[in-house]
Image (cartoon, rainbow, N blue to C red):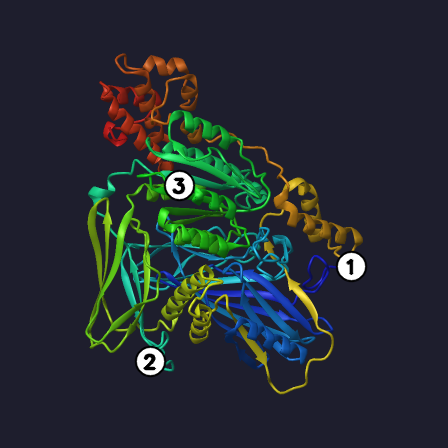
Amino acid sequence: MVNCCGLITANKDPVPLKSIEVELEVRDHVATVVSTLNYENKEDKPLEAVFVFPLPGDAAVCHFSAQIGQTQIVAEVKEKQKAREEYDDALSSGQQAFLLEESEQSPDIFSLSVGSLPPGESASIRLDYVTELAVQADDGLRFCLPAVLNPRYQPLGSGGSGGSGGVQVTSVPASLVPYSLSFSARVSSPRPISKVESSCSLDSLQYLNSDQTQATIKLAAGHKFDRDVELLIYYKDAHQPTAVVEAGQASAEPGSLMGDPVVMVSLYPEFPQSVMSSVASCGEFVFLLDRSGSMGCSINNSKQQETRISSARDTLLLLLKSLPMGCYFNIYSFGSSYEHIFPKSVEYSQQTMEEALKKVGEMGANLGGTEILSPLQHIYSQSCIPSQPRQLFVFTDGEVGNTKQVLDLVKKNSGSHRCFSFGIGEGSSSALINGLAKEGGGHAQFITGTDRMQPKVMQSLRFALQPAVVDISVTWDLPKGVSVTVLSPPITALFQGQRSLIYAQLTGQSPKAAEGCVTVKYSLAGHPSQNQLRFSLKPAEDTGSTVHRLGARTLIRSLEMEERERRGQPDGGLKEKVVQLSVQSGVSSSFTAFIAVNKADGEAIQGPLVRRNIPISRMCIVKGKSRNLRMGAAIFKRDCCIIGSPIARACSLQLDDEFEMADDVPPVMPKQPPRDPLLQLVSLQQASGCWLLDPALSAALGKTSEEVDKSKPAPVNSDVWATVLALIWLHGFKKDAKEEWELLAMKAASWLRSQNAPCLTECVEAGNALLGCSMQKDVLGL
């Protein structure tokens, strides 16, 4: 028996990574993250440690350095192949070297190689990045520190290899991650911080001043790597347009991106209330549901039985009940192959709704891998329906290896649809989920921790039902002698209350106390509108180079996508432009890498170099037919500490092999809990919006058929009575879930108005008496 001591992997290899320390600084809606990775080689031979890990997909990595003893080495950004050659040359000569590079398949996965770490040597690696915080449906700003990297499904023929675009991901259950994580955050904003929430255990929020515009918070001790670290930050009066001007670097060449000032404009369009009060009654709604094996996992790591696929089925029920009459719809599902309920989108009716719901109820996480590209290609091959704007809803746990290929396809078809995306569970790719929405002109949501999927999806449906904004233009009014170069791609979508960011380079000298103005013009439901923001051209203090780096990252991403679109054709040197911009700004790209070599005087490191892959947590280990074996192997290895025994090694190999196959076998479906009363009531609603008076409705209301029939006012139609009762029940007993049923309730109220039913006041009073509520008729929208 071998004792479990120190840092070791499941295969008994010592792990040189001891701990990760993360410091987050949030200023309004921009985050700066400093990560320190502490390494120590306790072996008797030099090591190369390789760590593959996720970062937010839109992060701009802007600093990479190493501290060895008293020596600090700051990395440089170089063209990727040159950086790799320099790294290999350093290792072959016995020098210490450090290489950080972005995956070629997905911009949210990085590989860190620490080469030639001598026996007994320690090293601290510092990695800095900046990122924008996305606005959630409830107006919270979301920061996510990905701690989970599920192996990315690599479709055949996608050109990648391994789990991260050429680098093998080593993943273990959270309980076996052999290093610690500490996390602290400092938040500051011009507006008071109302609260900070998280799916992880946090210490109490500590305010640093009386007006509550600055605060600190820490991750509670003992955090396990069983989930991403997600913070939701809420400010008072969050929807305020702002502009921040950041001065150029004195050391940079004037006229260059880093030498000139850069402005970051944050806009929150406000649409006329007269237009917003009308909900679109048309559209083609296409729902694309992931049915790969990983969707059979629990939606979070709690003991609740709800799986990702069961939550998605419930969500589709609410979506289908909330669609307006007169629209068109279809439902696709995908895994290693894809299916669709109808050959092409059909008109929404009672018959088509019932047929779709029957098929949805039969859907399981049993279609194998995660081939999202093929169903998207099929959807885009379908001709659009005249006067029915296409709205695409994508539900996935986002574990794919061909992210860039998928996003290129969405962008290519962005003129014909809007795309709303939903990342389900821990470890979903932020690059994929955010990229789908960004390139498809829609909105992205993440469902993690204890989140319910339904309210977030229904918020996106409200966005989809907003009238489409067209003819968007941005104009600048600047002092004479000042010109502007916009770094951001053109704005293609605007939603009420949702932020739009614009980065722009300002060239030339501006007079003191000068002002600039940016105007966004657009047309909404045939009504021309505009929003305007005036701002001072005086650079803000203490912003460092954050705005410049985010602007550079935005431009780099646009150029990378354009290069992929033109691959094989003359592209005007786009790759060279990306490399030049990346090197100049110090921001990572898919064509560059950070390289640092310790060239300090001293003897070359002797001995054969041993590679150690550092494991990272995976969220879902209980899938497929191997559920008991997996749990047994994990507990066996964790608790019994007999890592070196033949039995444990066999379990480890089998567990790892089956995990790679897990998307190809149907999961063991857990016993389903009793159906939510809300969903039970909603399932009975007709496509037109009404409910029928039958025993199933009475049971959903918690009454007998005799009680319901006896209370009905004589002159009232039975369907009107049933619909009024359903609305009273929703308002009276499910007010806290209003965002989930509000749209279908609006449809029901509209149906009631169309009936011109007599005695509605009497009907509402009788319903209140029966159900024990006190709703007024106007509350029901009647």
Structural distance between the alpha carbons of marks 3 and 1: 64 Å
* Quadrant location of the N terminus in the rendered image: bottom right
Rendered image: mark on residue 2: 1
Q: Which residue is mark 2?
A: 254
Structural distance between the alpha carbons of marks 1 and 2: 63 Å
Whether residue 684 is visible: no
When the figure is inspected, residue 9 is found, relative to residue 597, above or below; the finding is: above
The nearer-to-camera label among 2 and 3 is 3
Query: Do the CB atoms of the residues marked 2 and 3 lie less than 8 Å apart?
Result: no
Whether residue 426 is visible: yes
Question: Which residue is painted at 72% across and 71% down in the image?
Answer: 43
Residue 161 position, x and y percent, is 61, 58
Question: Which residue is painted at 48% across and 33% down in the image?
Answer: 341
Question: Which residue is painted at 73% across and 55% down in the image?
Answer: 641
Q: Which residue is mark 3?
A: 383
Label 1 crowd (10 A; few <14 / some 14-19 / many >=20)? few
Q: Secondary structure at mark 1?
A: loop
Nearest to the observer: residue 389 or residue 677? 389
Q: Compare marks 3 and 1 and give the one earlier in the sequence.
A: 1
Identify which amino acid the numbered label 3 is placed on.
Ser
Identify which amino acid the numbered label 2 is placed on.
Pro
Rendered image: mark on residue 405: none
Identify which amino acid the numbered label 1 is placed on.
Val
Residue 684 position, x and y percent, is 41, 25
* Quadrant location of the C terminus in the rendered image: top left
Outermost residue on the bottom side: it is: 601
Q: Is residue 648 left or right of residue 336?
A: right
The nearer-to-camera label among 3 and 1 is 3
Residue 249 position, x and y percent, is 36, 78
